[in-house]
Image (spheres, grey):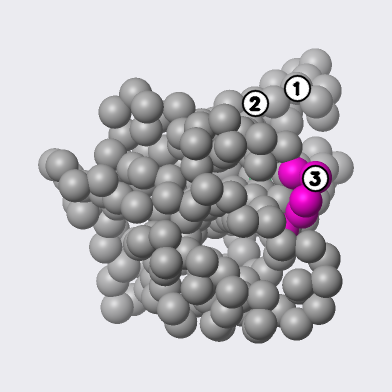
C-alpha cells in the first residue's frame, strides 16, 4: 500500500508524534515527512531527529504574524510532500492559510470528548467538573477552535481513587493508540466527510 505522507505539528513533549513514528515502524502505512515545532525547546524535536525526520522550528517571533507563519508552514510541508497535517499537541491555532492549503486534511487531537471541555486545559477542566467519563477526540481542524467534524472518540473512565496524574496518563495511553488508528483509516481510504458535515468510516 502507498504510504500516507504526513506533516506533524508539535509544541511539546511529542509523545503522540512518537506513537505515530513507532506505529509506522511496526507497519502503519504512514510516513512522517516533516515535523514542525512552534517551540524551540519542545522535546518532540529530539524524537523527530532521532527518527531521522527533518524538523523545522519556529520561534515566537515568527508567530507575530499568524498568517505569515502559516504560509511558511504550508511552504515547508508542501515541499516535503505532506498530504495531511497532523496536529499533535500543537498549541497554536491554524489560520485559513493552512486550512485552505490542506482542505479537510488537517487533523487535531483533543484530550476530552468534544464538544465537552474545549480549550487548552481539557483534562483539568473535566477533572474539576467531576465527570465520571471523559476521553479523547480526533477531529478535523477548522476555523473554530475544537469544533471541526469529529472523526473518532474513545472514552476514558474516571475510576474511584484515581488522581489527576492517573487520568492524564490514561488519556495519553488512549491517544497513542487512537491517533495511529485514525491515520490507518485515512491511509486505507476509509474515511469520508459527508455533506452533512459528519465523518463516516467505511468497513473493510
Ligand atoms: C495531548 O494530550 C493532546 O491531546 C493535547 O496535547 C497533548 C500533547 O502531548 N492537544 P504530546 O506532545 O503528544 O506528548
Q: Residues within 10 Å of mark 2 (few under 14, many from 20)?
A: some
Residue at (80%, 39%) from the top-left corner? 127
Please tell me whether residue 48 is drawn above or below residue 4 in the rendered image.
Answer: above
Magenta segment includes 11:
no
Q: Which mark is residue 6?
A: none
Q: Which residue is mark 3?
A: 41
* Disc 2 + disc 3, Cβ < 8 Å: no
Q: Taking 142 as reference, is 202 left or right?
A: left
Q: Residue furthest right?
A: 128
Residue at (21%, 54%) from the top-left corner? 189
Dot 2 falls on a residue whose secondary structure is helix
Towards the viewer: 125 or 83: 83
> Of marks 2 and 3, which one's residue comes earlier in the chain?
3
Q: Indicate the quadrant containing the C terminus: top left, top right, bottom left or bottom right.
A: top left
Residue at (42%, 68%) from the top-left corner? 78
Q: Which residues are magenta?
A: 38-42
Residue 190's spot in the image, x, y percent? Answer: 22, 52
Magenta segment includes 41:
yes
Q: Which residue is mark 2?
A: 170
* Disc 1 + disc 2, Cβ < 8 Å: yes
Residue 38's spot in the image, x, y percent? Answer: 72, 58
Dot 3 falls on a residue whose secondary structure is loop
Q: Which residue is mark 1?
A: 166
Residue 82's spot in the image, x, y percent? Answer: 39, 60
Amino acid at each position: 500500500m502507498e504510504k500516507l505522507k504526513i506533516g506533524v505539528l508539535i509544541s511539546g513533549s511529542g509523545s503522540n508524534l512518537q506513537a505515530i513514528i513507532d506505529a509506522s515502524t511496526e507497519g502503519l502505512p504512514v510516513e512522517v515527512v516533516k515535523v514542525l515545532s512552534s517551540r524551540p525547546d519542545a522535546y518532540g524535536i529530539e524524537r523527530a531527529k532521532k527518527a531521522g525526520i527533518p524538523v523545522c522550528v519556529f520561534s515566537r517571533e515568527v508567530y507575530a504574524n499568524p498568517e505569515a507563519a502559516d504560509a511558511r508552514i504550508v511552504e515547508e510541508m508542501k515541499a516535503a510532500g505532506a498530504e495531511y497535517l497532523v496536529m499533535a499537541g500543537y498549541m497554536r491555532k491554524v489560520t485559513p492559510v493552512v486550512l485552505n492549503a490542506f482542505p479537510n486534511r488537517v487533523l487535531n487531537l483533543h484530550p476530552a470528548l468534544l464538544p465537552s471541555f474545549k480549550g487548552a486545559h481539557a483534562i483539568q477542566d473535566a477533572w474539576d467538573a467531576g465527570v465520571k467519563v471523559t476521553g479523547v477526540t480526533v477531529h478535523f481542524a477548522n476555523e473554530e477552535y475544537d469544533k471541526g467534524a469529529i472523526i473518532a472518540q474513545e472514552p476514558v473512565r474516571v475510576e474511584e481513587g484515581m488522581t489527576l496524574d492517573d487520568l492524564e496518563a490514561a488519556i495519553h495511553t488512549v491517544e497513542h493508540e487512537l491517533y495511529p488508528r485514525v491515520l490507518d483509516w485515512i491511509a486505507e481510504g476509509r474515511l469520508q466527510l459527508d455533506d452533512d458535515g459528519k465523518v463516516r468510516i467505511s468497513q473493510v
